[in-house]
Image (cartoon, grey):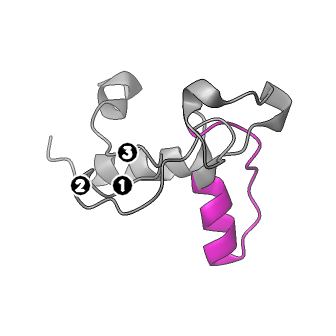
Amino acid sequence: MSIHTYTHTYVRTYVHTYNHTLRECRGKETCPLFAGSHKLKECTAQPTDYKCINCKTFMYNKNAKISEHHSSLDRNCPILQVVLEKYRQYTDY
């Protein structure tokens, strides 16, 4: 099974964080490119300015060091990879 199959199964809401549904989401809309409090269509960030909200939150909560210099839509995001691996572990083949 390809990684493409998994990327359509994880849950992400308009705040661009994982593991909750839109109905449960209480966050404010977050730009997926810059982690700012604006909509994607309003974003003027350049690729060198991208920040991933998931990695930024993880580093804050865990006091860990991982790169946040990518968008939350990046398929190589370390947090996305963790989420996908958990889905793989709990998938019954």
Given residues 29 and 65, the one toward you in this image is 29
Contact, mark 3 vs mark 2 (Cβ under 8 Å): no
Reply yes or no: does residue 71 show up in magenta. yes
Q: Which residues are magenta?
A: 54-72
Element marked by disc 2: loop
Q: Amino acid at mark 2?
A: Tyr
Task: Provide the residue designation for mark 3.
Answer: 12
Contact, mark 2 vs mark 1 (Cβ under 8 Å): yes
Task: Provide the residue designation for mark 2.
Answer: 90
Given residues 2 and 78, the one toward you in this image is 78
Element marked by disc 1: helix
Tell me what residue is drawn at x 31 percent, y 58 percent: 20
Q: Mark 1 or mark 3, which is nearer the start of the sequence?
A: 3
Q: Amino acid at mark 3?
A: Arg
> Residue 77's spot in the image, x, y percent?
60, 41
Task: Provide the residue designation for mark 1.
Answer: 86
Element marked by disc 3: loop
Q: Amino acid at mark 1?
A: Lys
In the orientation shown, which residue stands out farthest toward the left? 92
Q: Quadrant of residue 3?
A: top left
Which quadrant would the C terminus be assigned to in this image?
top left
Up-down: is 55 above or below 51? Answer: below
